[in-house]
């Protein structure tokens, strides 16, 4: 997985959406939007999760994706980006670190949920 280097509008144009249910039968559908790398469409450069649920299986899957490379999870709140390896911070754009602070290390799916709920 590689970091997305294009503009947001470019990403919006190229993303693919996937919908699915998470948790119990009375859940809200989770939507995933995937953005392919412009130079190699077989690689994903960004994943957006809309309406995430509290089912740990979703967060375990996201954690495994984060472990595949220099990836970061961030969300629109007043909180730092989350990483599974602190070396990821060395690969983040300077403006991202300035805007979102230094990354916070997470090791488990529960760590991800706790960080999000704490924000």
Image: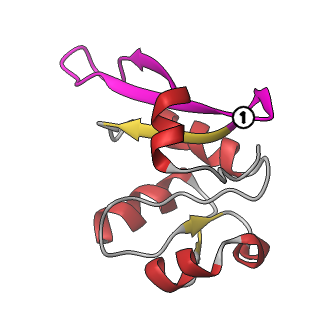
Q: Which residue is mark 1?
A: 38
View extreme (left): residue = 26
- Camera-nearest residue between 92 and 12: 12
Pick the residue in front: 41 or 117.
Answer: 41
For this view, does 11 lie left or right of residue 51? right
In this view, 21 is above or below 111: above
The mark tally for this picture is 1
Q: Is residue 9 left or right of residue 107?
A: left
> In this rendering, does residue 18 appear at all?
yes
Q: Residue at x 31, y 71 (%)?
A: 118
Label 1 Cα neighbours within 10 Å, binned few <14 / some 14-19 / many ≥20: some
Tell me: residue 118, above or below residue 84.
below
11 vs 49, left or right, is right
Query: Which range of residues does the magenta coloring cover?
Result: 15-44
Find residue 24 and report its image quarter. Answer: top left
The answer to if 26 sits in the magenta stretch is yes
Q: Quick one: quadrant of the C terminus?
A: bottom left
Q: Residue visible at 76% across and 59% down?
A: 70
Q: Secondary structure at mark 1?
A: loop
Classified by dominant secondary structure, the portion drawn in magenta counts as: strand
Q: How is the image coloured?
A: secondary structure
Picture residue at 36% right of the left edge, 62% below the top? 116
Instruction: Pinpoint residue 19: horizontal percent, then vertical percent.
Output: 40, 17
Query: Can residue 56 be seen by looking at this rendering?
Result: no
Q: Position of residue 8 (x, y in %)?
A: 47, 48
Q: Is residue 32 magenta?
A: yes
For image coordinates 34% across by 37% down, the residue present is 50
The x, y position of residue 80, in whole percent, is 46, 75
Above or below, 81 relative to 51: below
Which quadrant would residue 30 be assigned to in this image? top left
């Amino acid at each position: 997985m590689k970091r997305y280097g294009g503009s947001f509008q470019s990403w919006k144009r190229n993303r693919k959406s996937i919908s699915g249910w998470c948790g119990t039968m009375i859940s809200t559908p989770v939507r995933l939007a995937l953005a392919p790398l412009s130079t190699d469409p077989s690689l994903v450069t960004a994943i957006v999760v809309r309406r995430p649920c509290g089912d740990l299986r979703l967060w375990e899957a996201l954690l495994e994706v984060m472990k595949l490379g220099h990836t970061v999870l961030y969300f629109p709140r007043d909180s730092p980006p989350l990483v599974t390896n602190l070396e990821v911070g060395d690969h983040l754009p300077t403006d991202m670190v300035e805007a979102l602070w230094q990354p916070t290390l997470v090791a488990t799916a529960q760590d991800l949920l706790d960080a999000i709920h704490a924000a």
